Image (tube, rainbow, N blue to C red):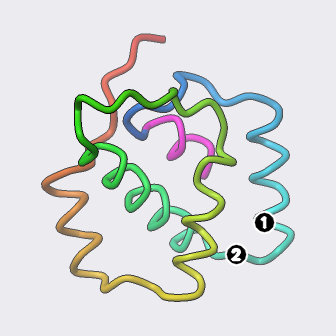
Amino acid sequence: MLLRAYVAMPETPPRWHSNDRRIALELYRRGIPVDVIETALVLGSARRLSRDPQRSVSPIRCLAYFLPVIEEVIADPPPRGYIQYLELTRVRPAQKTR
């Protein structure tokens, strides 16, 4: 479920890799709720999508990209309404060819 959500995010790889699975397993072992991780995916993706288009950034290659945002959400959760707003207006699952 988590890995499926990760690869559905914009600008992520079309498939997850073994390192992503290892990170997801570690998050599970730490007891981090899936909703916290999903919130971090949306928040991190929204920030990335709102960057200056003239600024080039490397592609997201691993779930590890979102680890700092996961820690941020744990420490200071954003309002639920804000995340719902981002989901509706900024972050939609990517259309990827498999």
Query: Which of the pair 48/62 is nearer the observer?
Result: 48
The crowding category of the residue bearing disc 1, from other C-alpha atoms within 10 Å (few below 14, some 14 to 19, many at least 20), is few
Q: Amino acid at mark 1?
A: Tyr
Q: CA distance from mark 2 to mark 1?
A: 6 Å
Q: Position of residue 43 (x, y in %)?
A: 39, 62
Q: Is residue 76 above or below residue 70?
A: below
Q: Position of residue 51 (x, y in %)?
A: 28, 45
Q: Amino acid at mark 2?
A: Ile
Label 1, on which residue?
A: 28
Q: Residue at x 52, y 22 (%)?
A: 14
89 left or right of 16? left
Label 2, on which residue?
A: 32
Q: Residue furthest left?
A: 89
The answer to whether residue 4 shows anywhere in this view is yes
Q: Position of residue 9 (x, y in %)?
A: 42, 40
The answer to whether residue 1 shows anywhere in this view is no
Q: Residue at x 62, y 64 (%)?
A: 68
User: SS class of the residue under badge 2?
Assistant: loop
Q: Which span of residues is magenta-colored?
A: 1-8
Q: Residue at x 55, y 65 (%)?
A: 69
**Count of marks placed on residues:** 2
